[in-house]
Image (cartoon, grey):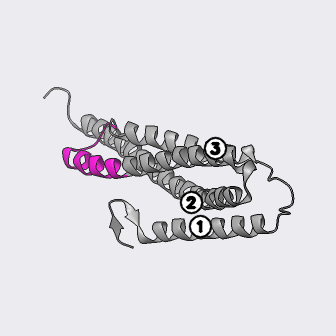
Amino acid sequence: MKKQGGWTGIGVLAVVLSAAMGALLAHYIVSSFDRTTAPVVQWGLLTVFLLPMGFAIQLWVNLNSIRETKGLSGSERRRIRVTVSEKTRQAQIALSFYMLSAIIIAFGLWFSPASWKIYHAVTVFTGLSLGISIASFFLMIHEWREISNFKSKVFERSIRNKQLAKKLEALNPKGE
């Protein structure tokens, strides 16, 4: 699958489908509620965004630490700089989305006890945001694995280079 600025078509499709499924599920759940009483505000929904938000922050920190990886050649460092910039931008977008969604949902929940329409709209938006959060969470786990694999390969290469240098040093006579 072709990447555009670090995004893959499958990743975007997964996020869109998750958003649609979350919104539809929330719509059907809210539609089944008894509307004779005022809606009960579910403030706990905001805590759902804490896990992916923390994960996005951790991913951002790990991405920035890759820039200081030792043992890279000049061309590898240039290539990794571009990749890290794309991945960092994605983590920043995800983090911004989580915070903005939490703020919008908080304001919506604040005003929702007065109206079922507002509550319905806020709940559908919450389902949509939750679907996006779940999909992006799994995409971030994939990115995290790539980072770990990269770091371990660079570390293994560094160890191999040190061992090779020791062997070459052992082959050279000390008197020369």
C-alpha separation, residue under disc 2 versus residue under disc 1: 6 Å
Classify mark 3: helix, strand or loop.
helix
The structure residue drawn at horizontal position 36% and vertical position 59%, both measured from the top left corner, is 6
Drawn side of residue 80 relative to residue 64, left or right: left
In the picture of the structure, the residue carrying the numbered disc 3 is 106
Q: Quarter holding the N terminus?
A: bottom left
Q: Earlier in the sequence, mark 3 or mark 1?
A: 1
User: Residue 100 appears at what percent x and percent y?
Assistant: 52, 46
In the picture of the structure, the residue carrying the numbered disc 1 is 18
User: Residue 41 appears at what percent x and percent y?
Assistant: 76, 48
- Identify whether 136 is placed above or below 11: above
Q: Which mark is residue 164?
A: none
Which residue type carries mark 3? Answer: Ala
C-alpha separation, residue under disc 3 versus residue under disc 1: 22 Å
In the picture of the structure, the residue carrying the numbered disc 2 is 132
The structure residue drawn at horizontal position 57% and vertical position 43%, both measured from the top left corner, is 103
Classify mark 2: helix, strand or loop.
helix
The front one of 1 and 152 is: 1
User: Residue 92 appears at what percent x and percent y?
Assistant: 43, 45
In the displayed orientation, state which residue is furthest to the left.
Answer: 176
Q: Residues within 10 Å of mark 2 (few under 14, many from 20)?
A: many
Residue 72: in magenta span? yes
Answer yes or no: is residue 55 visible.
no
Which residue type carries mark 2? Answer: Ile
- Identify whether 13 is placed above or below 85: below
The structure residue drawn at horizontal position 13% and vertical position 29%, both measured from the top left corner, is 176
Please provide the residue range marked out in magenta.
69-86
